[in-house]
Amino acid sequence: MSRSTARTGRFAAALSIAAWISVAAPARADAPIVALYQGTTIRFAHVATGGGGLAIGVNDPGFQALLHGTGAWVTWKPGERYILITTSVPAVVSFAMGERRYDVGPITLEASFAPFERGKEAYLPFNEVLRALDLVLRQDGQIKVIQPQLAALDVRQEEGRVTLRAHGGAPLHPRIVRQSPNAITYAFDGIGTTLGGTRQVGAGGVRSIAISSSGSARNPSTFVTVTLEPGTAPQPPQSTGTNEVVLAFGGGAQPGRAEQTFAEDSPSPEPAPTSTGTSGPAIVTGVTTAPASDGVAVTIAISGDASYEWHRLRDPDNRFWVDVKNAQLQGAPIEQNLMTPLVSMRVRAIDPSTVRIALTLDGQKPVTLTPSDAGLIVNVGVEDVGDVPRSGTGSVGSVVAAGEQNAAPVTPAPLDTSGEDYSSPEDTTWKFGPHSQYVPTNPRLIVIDPGHGGSDRGTIHGGVSEADLTLDMAKRLRDLLIARGWQVKLTREADVDVYAPNDSAHDELQARVDVANKAGARVFVSIHANAFINSGPYGTTTYISKPDDVALARIVERQLAADGTKDDGVVKSHLYVTYHTRMPAVLVETAFLSNPSDYALLTSAAWRQKVAQEIADAIGEYARQYPVPNQPAQ
Amino acid sequence: MRSRRRPVRTASRVPILWVAVIVLGVATWFYYTHRAPVSGESIAVYYTKLDGTSLGAARVSLRPRAADESTAEHLHNTVFYAAVQAVAGPPNGIKAIRFPPATRVLGVGIDGSTATVDLSKDVEQQAGGTFGENGEFKALVYTLTGIRGIDAVQVTIDGARVQTLPGGHLELDEPLHRSDW
């Protein structure tokens, strides 16, 4: 090899190494960063630069303090690929080691550089993490400021009122700074925003919403002005989460359906349409997507009357489009890539009087169209379905508000194939092991289990404990059954632990199971009162675990269906007492102590007597329908 | 004669090598900065609706398996990712039964086709009824058993196996399966 060739080879190798280093080399350590967040100085010591931006170590005490301040936390261990931040939304912000792409909930984004591991610590792109937490790093003179942002303002119609659900990077405390019969302005002190401009709503008594901001990086303020129809009253702001508040408006003159979203990537605001009369063209004022309970909802906000026609192609060409006729598009055409069950969305005017909203679906997904006086909602489900309708037509606007029927066929509502609904008594989809062929040694004995008791009070609401209620109902049931000739054994006769004071939940439950199994009872009935973290859920549920429980449960459920609260049916679950008892068993959650109307029922002696009566009737009916061999029917 | 020609041929190669190196460098830079994103998988994260029984699902994307990631590591990483998503639950706007707010996934393990999910003690902060407990664990089990290779879920709390939650109703000392619901 000649000297020049050798030199060239060495140079090429050096260049390659340099190129590799510039791309893949880990970032270098950097000086700590000090920044103000919500008036507190935070020092970020585990920082690095050089990988394409500022990186923050997940174990950094300052970073941990910042996460704590926003109600978020990070989950990662050395060697794990994913670095996951659960935010207060809640949403999971997921980074993967060595991958620039990252996800914020269902949205995939690309970071300026990939996370990397150094010294058993994961380093994340700091600016992207801040953005996911609805924060922005700003410079205020010589001082760095982590400024919370008003990141989203969702407009919805809920239960006859319009709500603005605001979410930000810090607790939101809106303050009314200006109010008149036609408008109200809220100030969010300490909160900045990149949202801005005016959005027309035109539904539910809310005409429009304008967002502006002022102040310095350290002391920002964001103002939200809501213009109202006469007679629309603002309701007090309500905090609904760590960093979320709902502004509600009711009593509007023009009830309708609104669903728009201000988001950081919203297009620039456009002037309001000048004519929305029925004689002029309708205006497509916005098209937004949002997660729905069973997929994605595409909301097409339309001001004025219009007709529409939709089509979809056959799998595997899963394109769907809807043409809104006699309509114009307000603002620029939209072209977005989306997450499953959608792939992309395009919105454009295909001629002077037709706006086309074209969706590419991620498979043969169910599509449901819901027209209203405020536009059209296209719901796209998650699970693939079989053959589906290919086209249809309909109308939006005043004809819908007036109750006029859409004669056009629409895709039937998607089946909830993602999960099972066991509420139907005819349901036969339960998967059980073999029947036990249980034969009671004491076929005239019923074991009743008053849930909880002693050191375990169960759920407590308004000073009323579940343990006391269940014992009361159990005793009432016992008296009724004894009067009808049954033998009855209660797992507890008083407010005591069945196994031992302060025993474990397992020992306690096993002791109750033992009472029934050792006695060879005909059936086992455990009585409870339900509860949840909020007051919404209510109703009676009958839980089971084994095949032998089904017949008894269906009769009990049928009897309790008329107990005055909602019948939530028979639910299969792996509950300890129903699973381990050898005889047919049910656990009846009679009603919710956490729900005001159910609470009123549970605290009524007459209602508890009624429940006891219905369970007693059910046991009698069960005994008649399923007599024990060689035993007289009860 | 040959010895005279050699320097001429070597000299003529130098610019070619220079060009090749530059092209290689530019191509490397271009690849790393402009490469098209690789399509990843997605998984269904289930949540139990407020009727207490039926399930909804939201899909979240998953990074493609990395070149240096073994099959076992990929399964472990997927289970970890899915467990954190399931415990976080769907976005606030979706009405669902949710784990107590501060509940964290402390770690996951795989033993055969059983995934072990270690939850923080915050999960014990239940409202007290069967409703929440049943809905939370049903969603977790459905999410993880939706991953190919997993058919059961063993729950531990702060690293320890528990028989039930305090004052709870659901049996947790055995792996849970979809067929439990």
Image: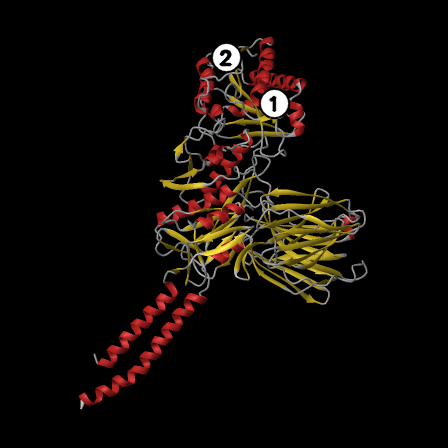
Chain letter of disc 1 in the image = A
What residue do we see at 37% from left, 41% from top?
Answer: B110
Q: Is residue A310 left or right of residue B61?
A: right
What residue do we see at 58% from left, 61% from top?
Answer: A336
Residue A634 locus on image (x, y percent): 57, 12
Dividing the picture into quarters, in which one does residue A349 lie? bottom right
Q: How many marks?
A: 2
What residue do we see at 51% from left, 33% from top?
Answer: B125
Q: Which residue is mark 1?
A: A464
Q: Element under label 1?
A: strand
Crowding around mark 1 (Cα neighbors within 10 Å: few <14, some 14 to 19, many 20+) is some
Chain letter of disc 2 in the image = A
Q: Element under label 2?
A: loop
Q: Which residue is mark 2?
A: A443
Mark 1–mark 2 distance (CA, rounded to whole Å) = 35 Å
- Going by the numbered disc 2, the residue's amino acid type is Pro
Q: Is residue A73 left or right of residue A470?
A: left
Residue A25 locus on image (x, y percent): 36, 62
Front tag of 1 and 2: 1
Crowding around mark 2 (Cα neighbors within 10 Å: few <14, some 14 to 19, many 20+) is many
Residue A535 locus on image (x, y percent): 63, 33
Can residue A581 be seen? no
